[in-house]
Image (cartoon, rainbow, N blue to C red):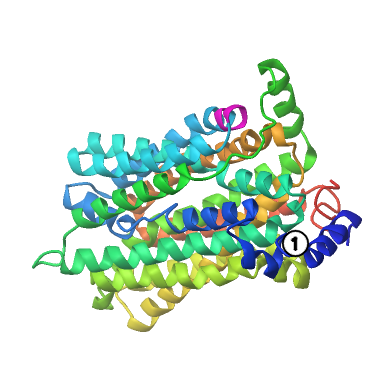
Amino acid sequence: MPQHEAIARQREAGNGCAAGRQWRRCSFLDPLARQLARLRAYALLTYPFACVPFLFLFFQHHGMDAGQYGEIVGAYYLAMFVAEVPTGMLADRFGYKPMLVAGPLLLATGFLSLLVWPTYGGFLLGEVLLGLGHAVLSGPPAALLYESLREHDQEWRFLRTESGIGARRMLGTGAAFLLGGLLVRFGNANGDAWALPIVATAMLCLGAAVIAVFLRSPPHQGRLRLPAFARAVAQEVRRPAVLWLLGYWIVLFALLRFPFHAYQPWLREAGAAEPILLDPLFVGVLFAAMNLFAAPFSACLPWLVERVGRRALFWGMPIVLCASLGVMAWERYSAADGDPSRSLAWLGVAMLFVQQVPFGLHQALLSDFVNHRIGSATRTTVLSVLSLGARAVYAAINVALFHVHADSGLGQALSVAAVVGLAAAMLALLLRPRNLLDAPAGRV
């Protein structure tokens, strides 16, 4: 254990309000405890996407096909590509709190615009606004947490605290999914009230903005002059560890995001063999259950890092994702050959849960990797550069895979994602700098 961490743990054990179990007894006096409580509350409403399990059906209801759906989602990632670095620079130069207020407001506006203008052009506009909102939120929550802990000499708590906050974020999203299923199923006599969960999502996003108003901004070190700021960012991004993570993150991000956007089309098609997969209430329960399944993996990440190590986790995440995509492709090929099977449909549903394991682990693991290796003044911008690369590449991948879906079937799209993704992941992992995933954070 590093000396500074041992000293911090001794301080935690000795001071009544400093950290750990003791801080709960006097949280009304401890600024860090209050900040963490607000960040945990914010996490519950960061991504309250009650409507997301049903957006494909909402778009389809308004005349969109699979190819157009891919283009609409691609506009979301393109908007993130354009906005990632500028919003990260704004956060680094002016603080994280304004971004935590603005992000949910942009998300609420984007979701409401889908209702106001339910056409291809309106959907593109709505997804662009959603992309801007996500770009604003891609780095500041983790950066604000790290700076809040660092202000109290407790940055060593980051992985444990961020993993717990990540679990709450998934719990909040899961509860919103369940709410969406209830609203769609019982919102009208036909069980297709697609608009209601969109309104609910926007209202919950506004709740997150209200919580963010009460967050405290720690002393900020990001006000370098622009030339010095640009040099600092370039220096951080050129580090071998950060360059490698960019390549790995591009692959992992694509393997995580494509199945997420393919869930509803897959359920729609697999519903021919198992009709319950078409029930909106079941879909809401399913999406909620997946997030609830992922949350404990995020919460127990520090334990997993200690037991199996970072290297095993970095290897395991893409392998698990590719294997699960292969099983889902097998189900679609079997159905296309005239042999739709309820058992294979439920095996595919099981793969949706398998994919939640790396989903629950990845965000805190990658944030921990980055935050301990870059300076405070450029932290959010470097996180945005990583996100920029991943989302820029995935925007093209998403459009391409959904056009494969439209032209050759969902099974073909899933198998292409599995095979190409596995090859790219193995290449990235084999090219990593020596001992990178074995060294303690902060030393590479």
Element at badge 1?
helix
- The total of numbered circles placed on residues is 1
Toward the bottom, the furthest residue is: 343
Asked whether 92 falls inside the magenta stretch, the response is yes
The quadrant in which residue 246 appears is top right
On the rendered structure, is 163 left or right of 99? right
Circle 1 packing at 10 Å, graded few (<14), some (14-19), many (20+), is: many
Frontmost residue, 246 versus 416: 246
Frontmost residue, 193 versus 137: 137
The N terminus lies in which quarter of the figure? bottom right
Q: Could you tell me residue 113's position as x and y percent?
A: 25, 39
Main SS class of the magenta portion in the image: helix
Give the amino acid type for the residue marked by disc 1 in the picture: Arg
Q: Could you tell me residue 276's position as x and y percent?
A: 26, 77
Residue beneath the point at 30% across and 34% down: 125
On the rendered structure, is 239 left or right of 274? right
Q: Could you tell me residue 351's position as x and y percent?
A: 47, 72
Res. 270 visible in picture: no
Frontmost residue, 256 versus 425: 256
Residue beneath the point at 52% across and 54% down: 38
Q: Which residue is mark 1?
A: 310
Q: Magenta part of the protein: which range? A: 90-94
Q: Relative to 318, is 133 above or below?
A: above
